[in-house]
Image (tube, helix red, strand yellow):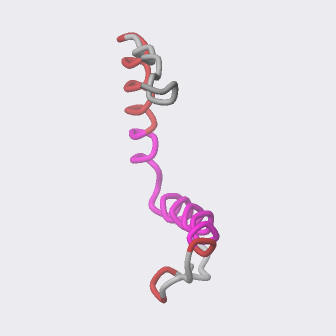
Amino acid sequence: MDSLSERPERARPSAELLARLRAGKALLRERRAALPLPEKVAQLLLLQRLQFPLIRIQRPLRSWERPWEIRP
């Protein structure tokens, strides 16, 4: 085998690290679920505005992909 196909095995994350990551993810999910609807919509619109330029670089935007010019 050549040197590119001989990759060293990556270290597996510890059980403690995985537990901390899962707990952090659950906490983030709880905080987001508790947000009022206008804040959820504002976050969605922000994420869409960040994503559109990335899509536009790859291909033209489809009519339903264009961002709405609204403010929550």
Q: Residue furthest front?
A: 1
Q: Nearer the viewer, residue 1 or 14?
A: 1
Q: Which stretch did the figure color magenta?
A: 29-55
Q: Is 27 colored magenta in this rendering?
A: no
Picture coordinates of residue 4, whole percent (x, y): 51, 30
Taking 60 as reference, is 18 above or below it? above
Q: Position of residue 32 (x, y in %)?
A: 45, 46
In the displayed structure, 25 sits above or below 40; it is: above
Residue 24 is situated, as x and y percent measured from the top left of the image, at 45, 27
Can you give x and y, in whole percent of width and height, for residue 7 in the image?
A: 46, 22
Residue positioned 44% across, 29% down in the render: 5
Q: Nearer the viewer, residue 10 or 27?
A: 10
At 54% from the left and 82% from the top, the residue drawn is 61
Answer with the quarter of the image where residue 46 lies: bottom right
Q: What secondary structure prevails in the magenta region? A: helix
Give the quarter of the figure containing the N terminus: top left
- In the depicted structure, whether residue 40 falls above or below residue 25: below
- Residue at horizontal 53 percent and vertical 58 percent from the top: 39
State the residue at coordinates (37%, 32%): 26
